[in-house]
Image (cartoon, grey):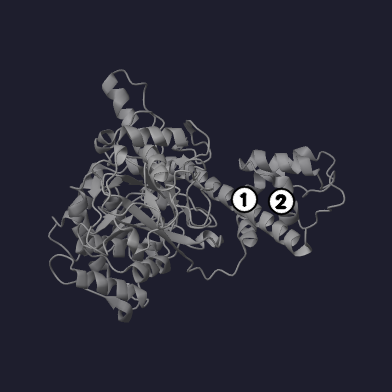
């Protein structure tokens, strides 16, 4: 093998290891969020009914005072992990008040342009958007049907996690165009946290939802929850929206936003074929869309409140439905068959291709599109043997310094519009492939020209075909993936990982010092690499190969003496 090829393979291997570490650190952060969410959720439940009624009055506009005083609601602000002081922008940068009446496309476009130029919507304008969207969302269904336009160039775009990264949202609108009856959007949750512009994204999406009804659709993500988005921003947490919103506006604005979050739909169904959900599937088999439609989405918390054992079938069913909603927002796919509790995130499920295929079959669907996970190329099909069953789309490029691509998906009824993939069910794909290429075996699902059904561009039937079996009576649906990067991050993924790891170590510094002291009774200031690994795994509850990270974290590590090569005490 040539030296250049060997170096490239080694570089690729190191990059893959760093990406794997980044993913593990990201999931660990989410697991810590769940722990803190339990505490914050108990504070939310302590919110008295008088305060809640006051907040609803603000959203309904029933108090007759649209120029309400800035500050908390009813004298009690929403619980948050940190106290902040509003810091309004200069008036010269403000846009507002908005025209009276419904939000129009012209107004929504003006809001987008203001944020593009670095401006700011006035507090009064933001609260008008929140009041208007609340009144629409409170009557929305849990499961919303979406139709792809047949007339060219009709498309439906599915956008994954944005996490406060305004440049990614603006790029998507520039690339795909603004919403219209021929150009629809489904935003699949996690609009907020981590990035610096969560407030702007929320306002743009809510204004667009109002300005272009039946053209913009919003799903709830796991971060659209007061107990999650009230937590600190990175590197000290995985939240940040509460601090950002209260700094840019006030406590009332934040409280109104998180109340609106509670009314966001959970699932969208595209053309009766594709289910769009933020997280994934369920620990219980046999779940139907009708079950999701019956969920009480207002009675949700990321961490189950302590409840007695159910005494009746009705009580058991109520607890089951609550967990189903958590699964919708928190679950992840796994490559192996079966389903198990998602112990990495500490909420939701890990579900395999067999569970996915069964759910699709029982609900007469063909495919699931979900988000929730940062994937390297912005788009991933995690089931190697059955790539057509499920796709992950993630739209925040350069997420947390990872240098990943962002992506969005565009669905249409015509292959002539540049679509690369065809949505075809398991039973239909072999029949379709045999009709066109009887002798050809399915290519590798990771090939650059691979479609979801295994058919390269130009081989699939035209849009007028409806097929048989699962596709009987349905027009074929195609999609293409658009990837991009808007990140200006100069740090390497290794540096981002190093920052995250050192933050975790510092967060547990006292316990680590005590544990290393116990492991070093002679006070030498050094422990073996094996002990170093065991102590860090035990104290941080992050089970990774700490030993392999010695060169990254322990500046005085002696690579030539593995038995003594480790950080001493809590200084690692």
What residue is at 48 percent from the left and 31 percent from the top?
A: 340
x, y percent for residue 489: 55, 68
Asked if the residues shown at circle 1 and circle 2 are in contact, with their CB atoms under 8 angstroms apart, the answer is yes
| Marks 1 and 2, the one that precedes in the sequence | 1
Crowding at label 2, few (<14), some or many (≥20) Cα neighbours within 10 Å? some
**Horizontal arrangement in the rendering, residue 555 relative to residue 39 (left or right):** right
In this orientation, does residue 393 appear? yes
x, y percent for residue 308: 36, 23
> Between residues 152 and 272, which one lies in front from this camera angle?
152
Q: Quadrant of the N terminus?
A: bottom right
Q: Which mark is residue 513?
A: none
In this orientation, does residue 77 appear? no
> Between residues 9 and 84, which one lies in front from this camera angle?
9
x, y percent for residue 77: 32, 53
Q: Which mark is residue 21?
A: 1
What residue is at 42 percent from the left and 40 percent from the top?
A: 430
**Horizontal arrangement in the rendering, residue 550 relative to residue 238 (left or right):** right
> Between residues 511 and 165, which one lies in front from this camera angle?
165
Note whether 59 is above or below 4 in the view shown. Answer: above
Note whether 521 is above or below 423 in the view shown. Answer: above
x, y percent for residue 328: 37, 41
- The CA span between labels 1 and 2 is 10 Å
Residue placed under numbered mark 2 in the picture: 549
Question: Judging from the image, what secondary structure is the residue with disc 1 in?
Answer: helix
Q: Residue 289 lies in what quarter of the image?
A: top left
Q: Which callout, 1 or 2, points to the residue nearer the camera?
A: 1
């Amino acid at each position: 093998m040539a030296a250049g090829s060997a170096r490239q393979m080694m570089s690729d291997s190191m990059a893959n290891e760093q990406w794997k570490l980044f993913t593990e650190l990201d999931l660990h952060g989410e697991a810590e969020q769940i722990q803190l969410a339990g505490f914050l959720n108990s504070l939310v439940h302590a919110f008295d009914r008088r305060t809640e009624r006051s907040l609803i009055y603000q959203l309904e506009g029933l108090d007759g005072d649209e120029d309400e005083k800035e500050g908390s609601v009813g004298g009690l602000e929403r619980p948050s992990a940190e106290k902040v002081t509003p810091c309004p922008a200069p008036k010269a940068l403000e846009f507002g008040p908005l025209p009276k009446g419904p939000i129009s496309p012209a107004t929504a476009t003006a809001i987008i342009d203001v944020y593009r130029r670095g401006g700011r919507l006035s507090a009064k304008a933001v609260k008008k958007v929140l009041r208007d969207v609340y009144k629409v969302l409170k009557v929305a269904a849990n499961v919303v049907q979406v139709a792809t336009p047949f007339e060219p160039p009709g498309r439906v775009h599915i956008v994954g996690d944005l996490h406060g990264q305004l440049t990614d949202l603006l790029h998507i609108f520039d690339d795909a165009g603004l919403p219209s009856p021929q150009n629809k959007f489904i935003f699949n949750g996690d609009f907020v946290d981590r990035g610096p512009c969560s407030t702007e994204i929320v306002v743009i999406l809510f204004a667009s939802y109002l300005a272009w009804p039946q053209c913009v659709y919003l799903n709830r993500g796991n971060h659209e929850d007061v107990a999650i988005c009230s937590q600190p921003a990175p590197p000290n947490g995985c939240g940040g929206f509460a601090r950002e919103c209260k700094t840019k506006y006030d406590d009332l604005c934040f409280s109104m936003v998180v109340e609106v979050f509670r009314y966001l739909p959970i699932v969208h169904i595209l053309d009766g074929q594709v289910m769009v959900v933020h997280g994934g599937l369920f620990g219980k088999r046999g779940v139907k869309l009708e079950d999701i439609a019956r969920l009480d989405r207002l009675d949700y918390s990321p961490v189950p409140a302590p409840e007695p054992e159910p005494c009746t079938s009705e009580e058991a069913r109520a607890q089951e439905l609550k967990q189903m909603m958590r699964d919708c927002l928190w679950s992840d796919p796994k490559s192996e068959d079966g389903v198990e509790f998602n112990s990495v995130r500490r909420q939701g499920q890990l579900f395999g291709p067999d569970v996915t295929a069964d759910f699709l079959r029982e609900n007469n669907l063909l495919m699931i599109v979900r988000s929730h996970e940062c994937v390297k190329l912005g788009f991933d099909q995690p089931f190697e043997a059955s790539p057509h069953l499920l796709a992950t789309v993630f739209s925040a490029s350069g997420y947390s310094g990872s240098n990943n691509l962002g992506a969005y998906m565009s669905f249409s009824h015509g292959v002539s519009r540049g679509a690369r993939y065809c949505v075809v069910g398991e039973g239909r794909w072999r029949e379709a492939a045999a009709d066109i290429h009887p002798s050809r075996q399915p290519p590798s699902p990771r090939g650059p020209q691979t479609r979801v059904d295994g058919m390269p561009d130009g081989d699939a039937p035209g849009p007028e075909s409806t097929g048989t079996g699962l596709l009987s009576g349905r027009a074929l649906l195609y999609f293409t993936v658009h990837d991009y990067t808007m990140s200006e991050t100069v740090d390497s993924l290794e540096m981002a990982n190093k920052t995250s790891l050192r933050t975790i170590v510092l967060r547990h510094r006292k316990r680590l010092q005590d544990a290393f002291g116990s492991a070093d009774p002679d006070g030498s200031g050094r422990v073996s690499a094996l002990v170093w690994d065991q102590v860090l795994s035990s104290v941080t509850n992050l089970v990774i190969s700490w030993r392999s990270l010695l060169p990254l974290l322990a500046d005085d590590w002696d690579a030539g003496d593995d038995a003594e090569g480790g950080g001493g005490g809590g200084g690692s």
